[in-house]
Image (cartoon, rainbow, N blue to C red):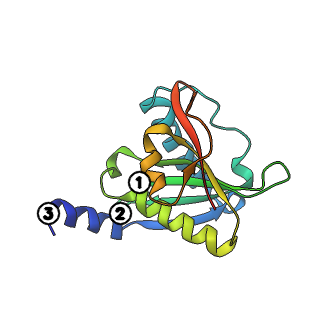
């Protein structure tokens, strides 16, 4: 294993994973979640949109925290939320998938998706899963069994596509 691969593998192995319902989140976790979503989606992607959409309180949230040795709070490395089926939508929906700048390039996106899909399929077997992907990430999500179910369309100035896995 080369030095960068070893470093990436080591950093992945050091992550602390938290899978929680909204009511179980601490104020620090909510703050970290909203700060990361704002940094990635609003600032980095220059996309002004209503991130606080009223759906977080019904969602499950997956957090990946980096090694925060010596820090009061470890840094948030990655995050995603999972919306369960409801009266309006019978699919499970994965959204707000992000890795923070400091943790990119170590395979965290793969690890988060693997972890979330394993959990979803154990808890809600046979339920289709859908996500609204940025169009350039179709190959990434396709590797996890997602296929496009819509045409590419623009949302908030960024090309997106709905994808689904059964």
Q: Position of residue 161 (x, y in %)?
A: 56, 39
**In the drawing, does residue 131 fall left or right of residue 113?**
right
- Residue 98 x/y as whole percent: 47, 47
Give the secondary structure at mark 2.
loop
Residue 56 is left or right of residue 66, and the answer is right
* Coordinates of residue 29 in the picture (x, y in percent): 56, 54
Say which label, 2 or 3, has the lower sequence index: 3
Total marks shown come to 3
Quadrant in which the C terminus is drawn: bottom right
Q: CA distance from mark 2 to mark 3?
A: 19 Å
Give how far across and how far down residue 79 sits, in percent. 51, 53
* First-in-chain label (1 vs 2): 2
Vertical arrangement, residue 68 with respect to residue 32, above or below? below
Residue 72 seen in render = no
- Which mark lies nearer to you, 2 or 3? 3
As drawn, the label of residue 44 is none
Kindly identify the residue that appears in the image at 51 percent across and 29 percent down.
158
Viewed as shown, does residue 57 lie left or right of 98? right
Q: Please state if 23 lies on the left or on the right of 25 as rendered.
A: right
Which residue does the numbered mark 1 point to in the structure image?
75
Which residue lies most toward the left here? 2
Residue at x 60% of width, y 28% of height? 49
For the point 21% across and 63% down, the residue is 5
Q: In the current view of this chain or complex, which residue is farthest to the bottom?
A: 122
Q: Which residue is mark 2?
A: 67
Q: Secondary structure at mark 1?
A: loop
Res 3 label: 3
Asked if disc 2 and disc 3 are in contact, CB closer than 8 Å, the reply is no
């Amino acid at each position: 294993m080369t030095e960068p691969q070893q470093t990436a593998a080591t950093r992945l192995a050091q992550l602390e994973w938290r899978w929680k319902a909204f009511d179980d989140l601490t104020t620090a976790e909510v703050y970290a979640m909203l700060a990361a979503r704002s940094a990635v989606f609003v600032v980095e992607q220059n996309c002004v949109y209503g991130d606080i959409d009223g759906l977080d309180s019904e969602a499950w949230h997956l957090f990946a925290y980096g090694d925060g040795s010596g820090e009061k709070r470890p840094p948030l490395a990655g995050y995603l939320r999972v919306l369960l089926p409801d009266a309006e939508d019978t699919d499970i929906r994965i959204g707000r998938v992000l890795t923070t700048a400091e943790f990119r390039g170590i395979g965290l996106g793969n690890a988060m998706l693997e972890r979330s899909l394993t959990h979803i399929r154990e808890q809600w077997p046979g339920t289709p899963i859908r996500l609204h992907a940025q169009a350039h990430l179709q190959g990434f999500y396709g590797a996890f069994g997602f296929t496009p179910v819509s045409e590419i369309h623009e949302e908030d100035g960024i090309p997106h596509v709905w994808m689904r896995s059964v």
